[in-house]
């Protein structure tokens, strides 16, 4: 699987709680399905209840037809749905409040939801959508759930589905939110930036959380045949994407998910933190991503966007205090 790369089949306790964002389709779907098959309780953090519930049904059916037939003992997968729209900070706050009220622990927080390559769009908070959906809202979710993870025992993991497309980013910390005209919107640059910020977040958090029970990693899934290009408007790009998918040059969603599943479940990664991965191997991103000064500037500016939604204690938690 995945060019020789794979993940181990680890028996997981039902008490091990995973939150996976954007789990109703694509890469997130495969991560959720395989972690649930290994036994974990998996919460699908998705914006559409219908899409999430039909994904959950499909996961159960695939589990019964692909896995059970061989072994003969069926069990209902521990799959749950919780609603969240990353285009709204208020929605993230509500999600986290609801999760906190449940009194549960949290062992794996998988920030996978994302969008890209469509025309300019703004969120209900008035921010450019890739910035908020891919980065800021999931940063907020991490911040709000950190204290729970700190108290959830050893081996808690935060994982970001990032991308090698960070290479398209032209980082300008003073212009994290796009304010130009819709026609001039540089979609590759802004998608790349959102993915670059996630890798920088990985490095900063790993430094701040050093020696704690929480590890932080991000990975590139490869070019994967998913719905990610659904908002693309250019005919040439649509044709290009569909050719790549049809001729099997792209990876399947399971192949794309393999490195992420490995990071989430492999006992060998229990204390491995602060890395960017591709095909289950650590990869060194370009120098501008590793620049400490830029990382710290991005980190500081991020809190400016979140100031109305984040508490002092949540900021301290993100600073490892
Ligand atoms: N496919 C690739 O080649 C590739 C390469 C590198 C990195 N990635 C990254 O991989 C991750 C998963 O993408 P994918 O390829 O699996 O694409 P996908 O099939 O389009 O899945 C994206 C997921 O994100 C969810 N999402 C989008 N906007 C959201 C919002 N406002 N609130 C909540 N959820 C939202 C989608 O929910 P809906 O179904 O409701 O829209 C869907 O569940 C993304 O972060 C992407 O950037 C993908």
Image (spheres, rainbow, N blue to C red):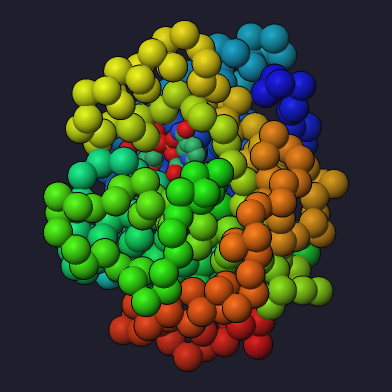
Q: Nearer the viewer, residue 91 or 36?
A: 91
> What is the quadrant of the N terminus in the image?
top right
Residue 301 falls in image quadrant: bottom left
Please indicate, yes or no, whether residue 177 appears anywhere in the rendered image: yes
Q: Give percent across and percent down for residue 316.
A: 57, 87
> What is the quadrant of the C terminus in the image?
bottom right
- The residue under the point 66% across, 82% down is 320
Please indicate, yes or no, whether residue 306 appears anywhere in the rendered image: no
Q: On screen, 171 above or below 311?
A: above
Q: Give percent across and percent down for residue 67.
A: 64, 17
Position of 189 compared to 203: left or right? left
Residue 263 falls in image quadrant: top right
Q: Residue furthest right?
A: 268
Residue 203 falls in image quadrant: bottom right
Q: On screen, 197 above or below 30?
A: below
Q: Give percent across and percent down for residue 17.
A: 60, 53
- The residue under the point 33% across, 32% down is 229
Q: On screen, 16 above or below 126?
A: above
Q: Nearer the viewer, residue 138 or 115?
A: 115
- The residue under the point 24% across, 36% down is 231
Q: Give percent across and percent down for residue 252.
A: 53, 21
Report the image quarter containing ligand 1. top left
- The residue under the point 55% across, 44% down is 164
């Amino acid at each position: 699987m995945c060019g020789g790369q794979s993940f181990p089949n680890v028996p997981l306790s039902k008490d091990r709680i995973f939150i996976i964002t954007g789990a109703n389709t694509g890469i997130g779907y495969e991560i959720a399905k395989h972690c649930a098959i290994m036994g974990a309780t998996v919460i699908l953090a998705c914006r559409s209840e219908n899409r999430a519930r039909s994904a959950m049904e499909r996961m159960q059916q695939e589990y019964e037809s692909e896995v059970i037939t061989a072994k003969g003992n069926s069990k209902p997968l521990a799959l749950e749905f919780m609603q969240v729209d990353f285009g709204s900070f208020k929605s993230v706050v509500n999600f986290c409040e609801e999760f906190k009220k449940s009194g549960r622990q949290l062992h794996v927080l998988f920030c996978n939801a994302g969008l890209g390559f469509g025309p300019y769009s703004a969120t209900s908070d008035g921010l450019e959508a890739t910035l908020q959906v891919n980065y800021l809202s999931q940063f907020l979710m991490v911040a709000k759930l950190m204290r729970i993870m700190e108290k959830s025992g050893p081996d808690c993991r935060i994982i970001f589905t990032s991308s090698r497309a960070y290479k398209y980013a032209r980082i300008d910390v003073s212009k994290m939110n796009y304010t130009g005209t819709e026609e001039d919107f540089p979609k590759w640059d802004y998608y790349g930036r959102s993915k670059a910020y996630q890798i920088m977040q990985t490095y900063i958090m790993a430094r701040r959380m050093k020696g704690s029970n929480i590890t932080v990693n991000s990975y590139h899934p490869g070019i994967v045949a998913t719905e990610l290009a659904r908002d693309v408007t250019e005919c040439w790009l649509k044709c290009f994407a569909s050719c790549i998918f049809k001729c099997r040059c792209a990876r399947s969603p399971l192949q794309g998910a393999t490195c992420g599943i490995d990071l989430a479940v492999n006992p060998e990664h229990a204390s491995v933190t602060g890395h960017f991965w591709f095909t289950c191997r650590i990869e060194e991103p370009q120098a501008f991503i590793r620049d400490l000064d830029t990382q710290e500037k991005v980190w500081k500016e991020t809190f400016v966007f979140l100031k109305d939604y984040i508490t002092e204690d949540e900021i301290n938690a993100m600073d490892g205090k």
